[in-house]
Image: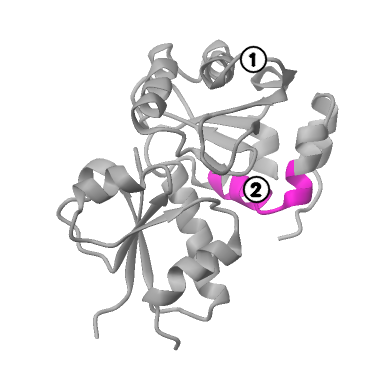
Amino acid sequence: MEQLLQLLTENRVLQHVQVKDWQEAVRTAGALLLKAGDIREAYIESSIQAAKELGAYFVVRPGVALSHARPGADVNRVGLSLVTMTPPVSFGHPHNDPVFLLFMFATLDNESHLDMLREIVELLCDDSMVNAIIRASDYAGLTNVLSQPSNR
Amino acid sequence: MKKTHFIVVCTFGAGSSLMLKMNVDAALKEMGISSATVEVSDMGSCKSKTPTAFMCSVVLKDNLQAQVPDSTVIGIKNFYNKEELKQALMPYVTKE
């Protein structure tokens, strides 16, 4: 998972965070991208606004959400952050709650993040990798999982 | 016969819909279907389109259906459940 290892630097990852609700989760993941210089502040509110308007459609599988806002607007460069939550948090999805892993990404257009997205898909297809990332206790544990070949 | 054409939809057409397209492509491949095409769209651009069926998160289904009242909209719960995807696709694809 070269792209993910490259993008998910230690300053873009927070593990076993305790948050009170999904909005705080998105703000936490967004703050990582903001601090890293990938986005401007408005990107975070746009991501929350989209979810407020349309619901938890971005909880793409049991336990995993993928948050983002419009490509280009308020984005400095392609970026990805990961927040793992203990305990897991309800995002309001009728089937896939609670959420353990929140990925948040930013992209410049509809294409520059495709390689990254392909690796996320590969990862999320593999239940054992997803569970290993949920369990990983620290950053080294995460990179260890991402360095292994997936079952796909 | 008109070719089977799916349009996968999310808010911006850049995240979950692209992700769903990758998984639908993989499911179609496993089903041995090579003629069906899968396009990605954002919510706002769906109105004028006439695919065999639209696909989106089950959470977006009612919202999308209201925008394309005369089209079929398939709501997907788990984008990573291959069986759910295959069963959803099955009625719309002809075995090759």
Judge whether B93 appears above or below A81 on screen. below
Residue A124 is labelled as 2
The disc, 2 or 1, on the residue closer to the chain's N-terminal end is 1
Tell me residue B67's x, y (percent).
20, 47
Label 1 is found on which chain of the structure? A
**Residue that lies at the very extreme toward the bottom in this rendered image:** B96
Three-letter residue code for mark 1: Val
Three-letter residue code for mark 2: Leu
Tell me residue A99's x, y (percent).
63, 32
- The N terminus of chain A is located in which quarter? top right
At x 14%, y 54%, the residue is B48
Tell me residue B22's x, y (percent).
50, 57
Question: Mark 1 highlights which residue?
Answer: A19
Judge whether B38 appears above or below B77 on screen. below
Is A123 in the magenta?
Answer: yes
- Disc 2 is placed on an element classified as helix
**Residue that lies at the very extreme toward the left in this rendered image:** B48
Whether residue A44 is visible here, answered yes or no, is yes
Task: Find the distance from the CA under tag 2 to the CA under tag 1.
Answer: 23 Å
